[in-house]
Structures are given as C-alpha cells and as structure tokens.
Image (tube, grey):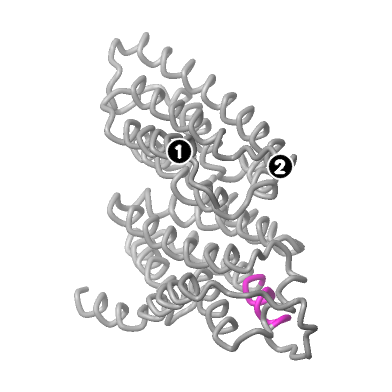
Amino acid sequence: MSFNPSKLLFFITLVAGSFITISSNSWLGAWMGLEINLLSFIPLMMDTNNLLSTEASLKYFLTQALASAILLFSILIFMINTNMSNFIEMNFSWLTLIINSCLLLKSGAAPFHFWFPNVMEGLNWMNNLILLTFQKLAPLTLISYSLDNQFIIYIIIFSIVIGSIGGLNQTSLRKVMAYSSINHLGWILSAMILSESLWLSYFIMYCFLTFSTVSIFNLFKLYYLNQLFSIMNNSTLIKFSMFTSLLSLGGLPPFLGFIPKWLVIQALTKNELIWLMTLMVSLTLITLYFYMRIFYSSALMNFNEMSWNFKILNLKNYYFILILNFLTLSGLFLIFIVYSMI
C-alpha cells in the first residue's frame, strides 16, 4: 500500500479533535473538538473503490451532524440560562438529559445505536477499529462530566440487553463486533457511575482487546462466519489466537478481559447495586455464547482444503498478533496481583 499523506493529515486532526474535547474547560470548546474529529474521520472512511464505505460515511455524517446540532442547541440554552459555559453541575435535569442523549448517540450506545451496526458493515477493519475504540473516547469523557445516574442506569440496561440479543443471529463479523461494543458500552457506563478511574481502566482494556481481535480479522480479511472454515485449517496457532482473543473479549476467566469486569462487579456489589450486577452478568453470558459460536463451529471441523484457498501470511504481522494473544493470557497473573492489593 502506497503512503497517502492526506490520510495521515486527517488522522492527526482526528486525534487532535478528540484531545481538544477532552482538554477543553467549556462546552463550546468541547463541541468544536467533536466537530474537528467528525470532519477528519469522514475522509478516512470514504473509499472510491467501495460504494458501501461511501454509503457508510454518509450515514455516519448524517447521524453525527444531527447529534451535533442538538448538542450545540442544548449548550447555547445552558449558557443563556446559567451565564456560564464551563463544566459545572447542571441544574436543569431536562437539559442534562438532552446533552447526554446526544453524546450517547455519538458513542453508539443503545437505544441510540440504530446507525452503528450498519455503518460498521460498510467499513474495512482498520476504520472499524477507530470507530469501535478511539471515536468513543471524547463522547464518554463528556458524559462523565454531566452524569445523570438514573438516566444512565436505563441506558446501561438497554445497552446490555440489545448488545447481547442483537448479536445472536448475525453472520457478519463486523455486526457481531458492533453489538459486542454496545454490550461493552453498558459495562463502561456502569463503571462510570461508580468511579472515574474504573471506567477509564475498563475502556483502555477494552481498546486493547478489541485491537487484538480486529488485528486477526484484518490479517486474514475475515468478514463473515463462513470464511472461518478455510482459515482455521491453516494452523493450530491461528485457532489458538482466535480462541484466546474472543474469550478474553467475552470476559471469561482467567483471560485478561475478565479483570475489568471483575472490578466492576465488585464495585457494583459494594454500592448495593446487586440487581444491576446480576442482570449484567446474566446477559453477558449470551455474548459469550456468540463469541464461542464464532470459534466453535469452525475450530472443531477439520477437512482438506484446496491449495488455492490458502493465503500467504505476513509472518511479521502474525508474530505481533501472537504477542498480543500472549498478553491476553496474562490475566491469570493479574488476578492474583489485583487480589493481593485489595
């Protein structure tokens, strides 16, 4: 692939837009950062050789533009009513509700998720990785500034339920990852109502695990479940890599993905939100089921594959993915470290 300086420029401004939002001390500055981020991501999404990516970028733009317009309107009302523009505690509950709804729409949380799986379906894995991870950072940071706990708990329930059930009948790996992300957003928001450091820790861990899983899908150009049958026969290491990445993302002990979920479960129990914790754990078992379905159906079948179906691997990239998978196995040791610190 040839070097494209314009793509690099847009990526730099995308990162800068999110950092402007995070470091801003006013709502107007935060809104400007979100707009810079949006206008930088649209050119990265578009591909002249793929009409689906152009359609996805248009859907993304229209949805984000709607959220931005309502967010700006709410910010102006807030500034007029309070004569202040900084992140102070909001006295208008309806205004907090509107602002949080706009930010949740930008992050793709349920029930504002209608655009998210469709946009994911039209993008390649690298753009999907940005959409699944970095694009959620700025909206989630702003949500943490204006939390309405009662409203957020409803959003948590919606995200956990829709993220779990929505991924069951999907044959597209991109849509499976989209609904998985919605489910993880429920966990991140539940961590957010408990502690700032807790939701940041969960988000960082989620980004790492998503990067590890998406790297495998991107290396072998996997987009649908039926493609796994031919890929899985290439190597036992490929089966192992897929197995550890998916189970870690699902939060099964003793993998790395279990650590943040375990910390959230402990925090919810200490804050007497046992009913919410029970609901979240029960529904997350469903997500673990469709993670297992991805691996189980293809890993247990072994048959001779025609030579033209094999792909020549880039060994450097593959070794890098193996290192990432080794780190996901380190969860067992981290459990003992965290447990000894508590």
Q: Give the range drawn in magenta.
A: 290-298
Q: Position of 325 compared to 294: left or right?
A: left
Residue in the picture at 48% in, 32% down: 40
Residue 293 on the magenta span: yes
| Placement of 291 over or under 306, stated as above or below | above
Sequence-wise, the earlier of marks 1 and 2 is 1
Q: What residue type is labelled 1?
A: Pro
Left or right: 264 in relation to 151 = left
Q: Position of residue 58 (x, y in %)?
A: 67, 31
Say what secondary structure mark 2 lies in: loop
Name the foreground residue: 266 vs 199. Answer: 199
Residue 113 is one of the magenta-drawn residues: no
Where residue 14 appears, as percent x and y from the top left, is 43, 36
Q: Nearer the viewer, residue 12 or 245?
A: 12
| Relative to 225, residue 28 above or below | above
Name the residue: 29% across, 10% down.
Answer: 83
Who's the residue at 35% across and 35% down the image?
16
| Position above or below: 234 against 281 | below
Residue extending farthest left: 341
Which label number is shown at residue 49? 2
Query: Label 2 near label 1: C-beta < 8 Å?
Result: no
Q: What amino acid type is highlighted by mark number 2? A: Asn
- Image coords of residue 7 (percent x, y): 49, 39
* Residue labelled with disc 1: 5
User: The C terminus is located in which quarter?
Assistant: bottom left
The chief SS type of the magenta part is helix
In the rendering, at what x and y percent does residue 98 appear?
Answer: 50, 26
Disc 1 secondary structure class: helix
Q: Quadrant of residue 242?
A: bottom right
